[in-house]
Amino acid sequence: MIFFLGRKQTRAGQLGRVGIGLGLILLALELIVQAVHPITQANGVQVIFASLTGDIMLDALIGAMFAIVSYSSLAAVLLTATLTSTGVISFPVALCLVIGANLGSGILAMINNSAANAAARRVALGSLLFKLVGSLIILPFVHLLADAMHKLPLPEAELVIYFHVFYNLIRCVVMVPFAEPMARLCRRLIQEEPEQDLHLKPKHLDTSALDTPALALANAARETLRIGDAMEQMLDGLRKVMHGEPREEKGLRRMADDINVLYTAIKLYLARDAER
């Protein structure tokens, strides 16, 4: 807190921001654990979860629903660990719920980015597909994995947490070599939307980046490059006008107006950055 408030625009200040965020996340998770503990003691909840007989697909689907409803896969994992520690669900069922919770977080990302641009939706789709592939690979071996993990001298609730961590870590390491093929697939599935408006508009001036000066300057630089591209097109159009193609004049005037719009937007963006 001291670093963030005292040196907000420095690297130390940004590290302080990260520390505050991690602290709030840990606090929220602790509150989640405390909040769900009384719920797990309710007879109705115990009856519902006791009905999970070990159908791996059904258990994974319920885990995905937990993650979506709780808006966090980690919250669903903590709830699963609590249910396991109280004996409400068996350990193999808990592993299926964790796998489903990870899949649910991918679905949640797709829902949250449904109105975003094509690039953001591709990232969410790639994450979901990787999680789906990982789930389909490991689900058939859940019972074997549960038997092997039972031999470890740790409480089942802790084993659930460790499984969540190492499952995601191993999945990421294994999937990294396939990032480029997945990116090509996502680009094929989600294509860039054609621009209906021919006028240039700012694309990279993200106001959420103003709190990070280096990122804000990078956004302004990217927008400046767009001005350079527009001026190159103007010069090409000017050459055509000089060689007897007057119909290009209207396009030149429009591009000149667009460049002025971009220039003004960049100035205002940098002015807001300087005020922070």
Image (cartoon, rainbow, N blue to C red):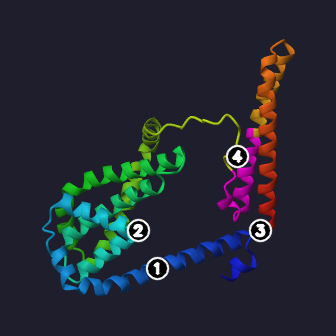
How many angstroms separate mark 2 from mark 1 (CA)? 11 Å
How many angstroms separate mark 3 from mark 1 (CA)? 29 Å
Dot 2 lies on which element? Answer: loop
Dot 4 lies on which element? Answer: loop
Which mark lies nearer to you, 4 or 1?
4
Q: Position of residue 60 (x, y in %)?
A: 25, 61
Residue named by callout 2: 72
Foreground residue, 177 or 106?
Answer: 106
Q: Residues within 10 Å of mark 1 (few under 14, many from 20)?
A: few
Q: Residues within 10 Å of mark 3 (few under 14, many from 20)?
A: few
Query: Looking at numbered disc 1 in the image, what kind of residue is underneath it?
Result: Ala
- Residue 141 drawn above or below residue 89: above
Residue 222 among those drawn in magenta: yes
Quarter of the image that includes the C terminus: bottom right
Residue named by callout 1: 28
How many angstroms separate mark 2 from mark 4 (CA)? 33 Å
Image mark for residue 276 = 3
Residue named by callout 4: 202
The reply to whether residue 240 is in sight is no
In the image, what residue occupies the spot 12% across and 68% down?
53
Q: Which residues are magenta?
A: 205-226
